[in-house]
Structure formats: structure tokens, C-alpha cells
Image: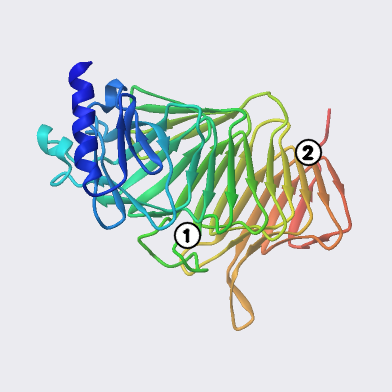
């Protein structure tokens, strides 16, 4: 214990010579980051501060499956400060010491009662990898940006990793998008290849897009409510199974002027979930892929627009977009609309005077 305190004190002295860094017997701290240094799996982590407004974290050595598991007491990003996860096997001191390869999956898990606030750029240094941020207390995202990643999972729930399998259990944890949300590659297009995020998955009990929030990412997948998900971590997430469980009422809400825009979008919810849309839920085809929108929720109230747009050239749909909605009760309010080149809506009851595209087939299954 005495040696650990001396080590923390040494880090503190060195850090104070350049940047506002603190070290305690519970963790090494810089701005919005506190590494859980008491965690057995994090003893090899080093927090290195550069002088250019960047935080550099030498992540833990990955296991045989390519998974680097890193634990924190606090994990936030801030405007104007880049947080780098060092996945460069030639520069990461932990990897150099053990002769390890770069990670394919980087898990950042929060072990405290604090929420995670993502308000800046999180970047992978070195080889690209998938980022997983796990915090059962909740996650907020305001102009959060991700660079050099193969994908990002935001998890407001519990995680277990064993035997090449990752499982998430979501119940009441919230993920809130505010301000600019996630603006994908920094532009309004979803068909341009970029070093910025193109694949986003969100696991939470409740999700809210506050007034004006926007998420513009090519591939998006939302798992909402009391849901248990099992994933094959070894095979690049190719096998993903989500099981909705009975639980308290949960919601997926878009407030006025908020927007989800994608090329491929899936929204999966557990039993009893309410999807309230006061903004825009849209997908669009690009030159390579059709637009594909799939929603499963027990209750849907649409007050603005749910749409799947095809690409148009010379006033003709060249590449269509499809929509597939499964719900028990759908209210399509006046001045609202559901549009697509083609699609199916399976439901038990339908109310409202909103626009419903004739290309979309309504299916009312027989109820026993």
C-alpha cells in the first residue's frame, strides 16, 4: 500500500509540471477521466498527458480474442480535448512490454455511480478497433465524435465478458442525445467513406433525443428496454441475439426538431416499450445500398415523420428504400407521415389522420 501511494505521488509530481493531473489511491485522474487503478485488470494501465490538449491512455493488453478490457471510475470526454486510446502496438508501453498485438475490441467500463458525459472527440491511436463504453448509470452525448473506429457500442447497462461471449443486460439505464448529438462524418451525407463513425449500436432501458439533437451515422442499431443481448465477441459481432424481457414501461423518444438519419436503421424494444416520435426518423438509399428501416415497439406515436427514401435520378427511383414496422398500436397524428418506396407495417390497431404512403402495406394479424 505504501509503494502504491509513492507511485501515485510520483505521477502527481511529474504531471503538475505540465498539465492539471491528479493521482489518488483510488485512481489516476485527468479532466473527465479517472482510471480505476485498484481494479486488478487495470494495474498495467498508464495515463500519459501530452502538451497539445490531448489525453493519451495506453489501453490494457488484449486477450487471445483481441479484447482489451479497461475499467474506470469516471470516463468523460470534453469539448476541445481529444481523448486517445493508444492501440498502437509499437508505442503502447503495455503492449511493448508483453509483445502484444493491437486490440480488435476495446471495452471501457465505468465502476462507480457516475454517469458518462461524451462531449468531445474519442480517438483510437494506431490500429482501428471497435469501442464499447459501458456505464449502467447512463450516458449523455452532445457533439460526441469518434475517430478511427470500426464501430461504437454505447451501453447503459451491465456487461459480462466470458468464454468469447459478451452479454449486456439493460433495464433502467438512460442514454440521452443533446445538442449536435453524433454528427457521423461531420457532414450531412451518409454515403461517404470517412475516418469518422459509420456504425453505432445503443443499448439502454430508455433513450431520449432532446430538442434538436441529431444522430447521423450510416448504420444504427438500438436495443431498448429490459433486454438481454448475447454477442460473439471473437467473430466480430456476427452473432447477436437480443431477448426482450418483461419489465417496467420504457421509452424511446425523439423531441421536436431532433433527428435520426441513417442508411440502415434497426430499433428493437422489449415488451411494453413506447416509441414517441416528435422529430424525424429517416433512412436513405445511397449509391451502394438500399435504405432499410426496421422498428419493433409495442406502442408507436408518430407526430412528425418516419420515412425511408430511395435515391432519385431523372425523377425515377433508382435504388429504393424499404420500411418494416411491427407494433401493437400505432397512432399517426395529423400532419405526421409514414413514407417509403415499399414496406410492411404489422399492427393490431391504427389511429390518426396522418399521411400513410400507399406503397406501404398494412397487415392486421388475427388476434386469438
Give the percent coordinates (x, y) of residue 254: 68, 51
SS at circle 1: loop
**Observer able to see residue 44:** no
Hey, which quadrant is residue 71 in on the image?
Answer: top left
In the rendered picture of this protein, how many numbered marks are placed on residues?
2
Question: In the image, which is nearer the foreground, mark 2 or mark 1?
Answer: 1
The residue labelled by disc 1 is: 184
Give the percent coordinates (x, y) of residue 143: 50, 56
> In this image, 25 relative to 201: left or right?
left
Q: Are marks 2 and 1 in contact (CB under 8 Å)?
A: no
The answer to whether 77 is drawn above or below residue 11 in the figure is below
- Residue at x-position 11% and y-position 38%: 96
The residue labelled by disc 2 is: 328
Hey, which quadrant is residue 334 in on the image?
Answer: bottom right
**Observer able to see residue 168:** yes
> In this image, 64 relative to 199: left or right?
left
For this rendering, which residue is in front, 28 or 117?
A: 28
SS at circle 2: loop
For this rendering, which residue is in front, 73 or 174?
A: 73
Amino acid at each position: 500500500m505504501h509503494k502504491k501511494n509513492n507511485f501515485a505521488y510520483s505521477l502527481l509530481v511529474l504531471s503538475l509540471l505540465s498539465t492539471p493531473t491528479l493521482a489518488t489511491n483510488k485512481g489516476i485522474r485527468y479532466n473527465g477521466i479517472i482510471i480505476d487503478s485498484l481494479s486488478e485488470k487495470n494495474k498495467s494501465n498508464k495515463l500519459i498527458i501530452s502538451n497539445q490538449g490531448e489525453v493519451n491512455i495506453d489501453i490494457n493488453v488484449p486477450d487471445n480474442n483481441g479484447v482489451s478490457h479497461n475499467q474506470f471510475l469516471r470516463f468523460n470526454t470534453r469539448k476541445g480535448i481529444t481523448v486517445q486510446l493508444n492501440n498502437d502496438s509499437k508505442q503502447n508501453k503495455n503492449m511493448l512490454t508483453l509483445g502484444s498485438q493491437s486490440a480488435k475490441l476495446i471495452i471501457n467500463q465505468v465502476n462507480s455511480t457516475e454517469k458518462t458525459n461524451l462531449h468531445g472527440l474519442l480517438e483510437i491511436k494506431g490500429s482501428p478497433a471497435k469501442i464499447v463504453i459501458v456505464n449502467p448509470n447512463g450516458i449523455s452525448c452532445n457533439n460526441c465524435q469518434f475517430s478511427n473506429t470500426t464501430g461504437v457500442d454505447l451501453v447503459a447497462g451491465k456487461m459480462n465478458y466470458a468464454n468469447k461471449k459478451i452479454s449486456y443486460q439493460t433495464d433502467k439505464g438512460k442514454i440521452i442525445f443533446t445538442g449536435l448529438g453524433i454528427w457521423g462524418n461531420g457532414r450531412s451525407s451518409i454515403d461517404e467513406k470517412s475516418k469518422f463513425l459509420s456504425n453505432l449500436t445503443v443499448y439502454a432501458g430508455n433513450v431520449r433525443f432532446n430538442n434538436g439533437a441529431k444522430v447521423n451515422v450510416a448504420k444504427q442499431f438500438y436495443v431498448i428496454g429490459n433486454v438481454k443481448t448475447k454477442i460473439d465477441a471473437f467473430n466480430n459481432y456476427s452473432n447477436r441475439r437480443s431477448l426482450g424481457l418483461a419489465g417496467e414501461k420504457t421509452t424511446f423518444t425523439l423531441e421536436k426538431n431532433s433527428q435520426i438519419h441513417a442508411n440502415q436503421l434497426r430499433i428493437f424494444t422489449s415488451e411494453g416499450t413506447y416509441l414517441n416520435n416528435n422529430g424525424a426518423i429517416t433512412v436513405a438509399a445511397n449509391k451502394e445500398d438500399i435504405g432499410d428501416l426496421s422498428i419493433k415497439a409495442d406502442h408507436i406515436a408518430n407526430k412528425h415523420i418516419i420515412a425511408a427514401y430511395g435515391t432519385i435520378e431523372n425523377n425515377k427511383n433508382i435504388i429504393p428504400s424499404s420500411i418494416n414496422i411491427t407494433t401493437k398500436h400505432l397512432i399517426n397524428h395529423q400532419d405526421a407521415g409514414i413514407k417509403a418506396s415499399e414496406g410492411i407495417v404489422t399492427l393490431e390497431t391504427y389511429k390518426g389522420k396522418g399521411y400513410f404512403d400507399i406503397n406501404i402495406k398494412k397487415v392486421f394479424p388475427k388476434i386469438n
